[in-house]
């Protein structure tokens, strides 16, 4: 920018000087003609005329050089002062531009910080929403799904099993003699035992189509589909062995568990309430008869 200002000022000086030089030269030329005419009219001889004209010429030359030099210096000094002012103005504008860029960068940083805060806040709100959403379908003590969610999921699973023509299994798991244990050991000990069994059930029923629920008073529900009768029996055996091998002591072995498994096929699939009622009846019958594991097929 500085070079551009200097180049522009050079052209300005040249044009101004050229214009003044032409004007001064024209004035001096005209004056010389007038002087010549006056000298000629005065009637002096040629020798005196030549001497006087030579003197006038020398004076005009000196005057012209002096005048043009003075004009050039005036223009140069004025231009330099103007150039310096323009240069200072250019630097000032450059500083202001830098300050604006700096402010823009600061604003950009502030905007980014605000965007990050908004993103974090949205993530927290989404996490909180999921937490409260889960709180509506989860049992607080066990972390398993609650009965309310069971009654939402079961009809959908029944319809899906009918559509896919696959058997649907509803297994009830019950801790035996839990009421007596709670009277003897207290509610906290009973809740601790329920929580331990819940964790084993959750660990076993972890396939994409498996659901686990806490029903009531030490009773749990495992709901799944797609397995054959034989594979269903193997899976239930695995669940029972996993619960009984809990490392918390032999307490669960002493109390024992009962698993009543109801298998419904697509052709004779009951509705949700009847399905759950038949599973409850099977569990009560199993406990009354002392059967630890029992299976019933609805055909």
Image (tube, rainbow, N blue to C red):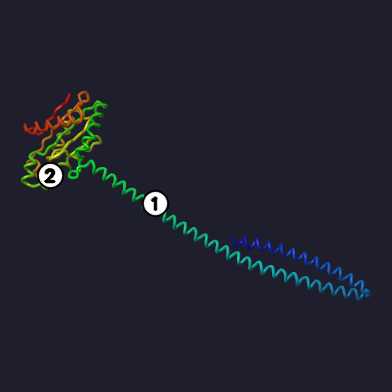
**Quadrant of residue 145 in the image?**
top left
Vertical side of 167 occupied by 249: above or below: below
Q: Dividing the image into 4 quarters, which one contains the N terminus?
A: bottom right
Q: Are marks 2 and 1 in contact (CB under 8 Å)?
A: no
Residue at screen point 7% across, 47% down? 185
Local SS, label 2: helix
Residue ID for mark 1: 115
Task: Answer few, some or many: residues within 10 Å of disc 1's Cα (few below 14, many 20 plus, some between 14 and 19).
Answer: few
Query: Number of labelled discs?
Result: 2
Q: Secondary structure at mark 1?
A: helix
Residue count near mark 2 (Cα–Cα under 10 Å), binned few <14, some 14–19, many ≥20: some
Provide residue 43's location: percent of width, then percent of height: 94, 74
Residue 55 vertical placement versus 205 (above, below): below
Q: Judge left or right: residue 56 versus residue 43.
A: left
Residue 193: which numbered mark, if any? 2
| Residue for point 26% across, 43% down | 133
Which residue is drawn at the image coordinates 47% and 59% (left, top)? 103
Task: Specify whether 59 is left or right of 121.
Answer: right
Q: Judge whether 104 appears above or below 206 on screen.
A: below
Left-right relation of 263 to 106 = left
Residue 242: where, in percent of width, then height?
15, 39
Q: Tell me where residue 6 sits by quadrant.
A: bottom right
Query: Where residue 66 appears, x then y in whole percent?
Result: 75, 72
């Amino acid at each position: 920018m500085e070079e551009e200002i200097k180049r522009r000022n050079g052209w300005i000086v040249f044009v101004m000087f050229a214009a003044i030089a032409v004007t001064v030269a024209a004035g001096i030329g005209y004056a010389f003609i007038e002087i010549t005419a006056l000298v000629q009219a005065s009637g002096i001889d040629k020798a005196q005329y030549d001497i006087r004209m030579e003197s006038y010429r020398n004076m005009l030359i000196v005057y012209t050089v002096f005048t043009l030099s003075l004009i050039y210096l005036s223009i140069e000094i004025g231009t330099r002062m103007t150039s310096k002012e323009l240069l200072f103005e250019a630097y000032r504008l450059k500083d202001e531009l830098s300050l604006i860029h700096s402010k823009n960068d600061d604003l950009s940083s502030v905007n980014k910080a605000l965007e990050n805060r908004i993103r974090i806040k949205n993530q927290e709100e989404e996490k909180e929403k999921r937490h409260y959403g889960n709180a509506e379908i989860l049992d607080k003590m066990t972390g398993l799904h609650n009965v309310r969610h069971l009654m939402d999921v079961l009809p959908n699973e029944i319809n899906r099993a009918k559509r896919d023509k696959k058997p649907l299994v509803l297994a009830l798991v019950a801790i035996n003699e839990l009421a007596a244990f709670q009277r003897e050991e207290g509610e906290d000990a009973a809740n601790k035992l329920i929580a331990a069994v819940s964790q084993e059930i959750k660990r076993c029923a972890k396939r994409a189509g498996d659901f686990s629920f806490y029903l009531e008073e030490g009773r749990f529900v495992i709901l799944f589909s797609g397995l054959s009768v034989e594979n269903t029996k193997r899976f239930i055996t695995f669940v029972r062995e996993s619960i009984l091998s809990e490392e918390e002591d032999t307490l669960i072995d002493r109390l024992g568990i009962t698993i009543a498994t109801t298998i419904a096929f697509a052709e004779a699939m009951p509705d949700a309430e009847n399905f759950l009622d038949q599973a409850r009846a099977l569990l009560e019958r199993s406990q009354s008869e002392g059967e630890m594991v029992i299976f019933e097929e609805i055909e």
